[in-house]
Amino acid sequence: MKVTGGKRLLAMALLATLTGASTLMASHSWGNFHWARTANPFTLKTGDNVDSNWDVYLDQAIGDWNLSSVLDLQKVAGGANPRNCRPTSGRIEVCNSKYGNNGWLGIAQIWASGNHITQAVSKMNDTYFNTAKYDTPAWRSLVMCQEIAHDFGLDHQDETFDNPNLGSCMDYTSNPIGNEHPNQHDFDQLEAIYAHLDTTTTITQATNRGAAAGQIDRGQFGQLMRSTNGGRTELYVLALANGEKVFTHVIWAD
């Protein structure tokens, strides 16, 4: 059920108490990238292309991020073939499939025109999630929560795997228990990203048009922008002929 008005404020207050929220300003966007929209909160359609093994984690991530005061994710029927997970303009597509032993556990790919996000996909690689190491509720929750968040502009709070957990799915870790959900710092950052309004919008649904979305190999992600933890977490950018850029956030499996 959607949380609104007083219920939303109560939920946010409770979340702040549970997570020990800091009063410091958040600072973990991955640039000035955001969905263009003319009002807050804005509704962002989220295409469900996941199977029954992932339904609960997609629903959980949508419910978690909908505690934000600026963003409402609306789950809709998927518009993609999970195997290639091509994007649909104006919305997010979320997919899972056996993408192969290509090294990545999960990726988020975001198309941007200038600073405005135009479409995005998040993909969960069952080749690794079907193994004993990653087939756990904590790993599935963290990766789903994090990859979706990249799609609307959030970056990682911390990229060190062996330090204490921050209680946020935007914190990389070798032990994801306790990092399955957003924390107040994440919601503060969302408010900072979407503090201004735009005169145009990129959240109107159009058509499936992303020929570049089928890429799953490291060499096809474009230019490496950032690599941390010995290459376990990376960000790539690929320039398209139409002037758009595709940003790919990658978490590599052990």
Image: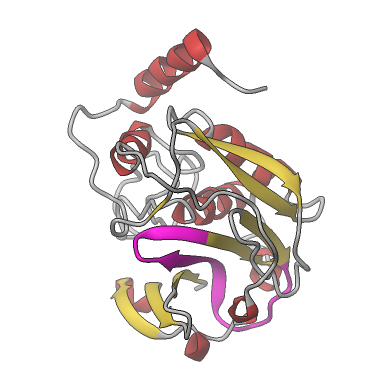
Residue 226 located left or right of residue 129 = left
At horizontal 42% and vertical 23% (from top left) the residue drawn is: 15
Q: Could you say which is closer to the camera, residue 68 or residue 175?
A: 68
Q: Residue furthest right?
A: 52
Q: Could you say which is closer to the camera, residue 118 or residue 5?
A: 118
- Name above or below for residue 208 compared with residue 52: below
Q: Residue furthest left?
A: 24
Is residue 164 at least partly visible in the picture? yes
Q: Name the colour scheme.
A: secondary structure
| Residue 181 drawn at (x, y percent) | 49, 39
Q: Residue furthest bottom?
A: 219
Say if the magenta span includes residue 58: no
Say if the magenta span includes residue 115: yes
| Residue 171 drawn at (x, y percent) | 37, 51
At horizontal 38% and vertical 73% (from top left) the residue drawn is: 234
At horizontal 62% and vertical 65% (from top left) the residue drawn is: 123
- Name above or below for residue 254 compared with residue 194: below
Q: Residue furthest front?
A: 199
| Residue 139 drawn at (x, y percent) | 57, 53
- Name above or below for residue 12 compared with residue 146: above
- Name above or below for residue 199 compared with residue 160: above
| Residue 164 drawn at (x, y percent) | 31, 47
- Numbered range of the magenta stretch: 97-118
Count up the numbered dots. Answer: 0
Residue 136 located left or right of residue 7 = right
Residue 237 located left or right of residue 228 = right
At horizontal 60% and vertical 82% (from top left) the residue drawn is: 215
Is residue 175 at least partly visible in the picture? no
Classified by dominant secondary structure, the portion drawn in magenta counts as strand
Quarter holding the N terminus is top right
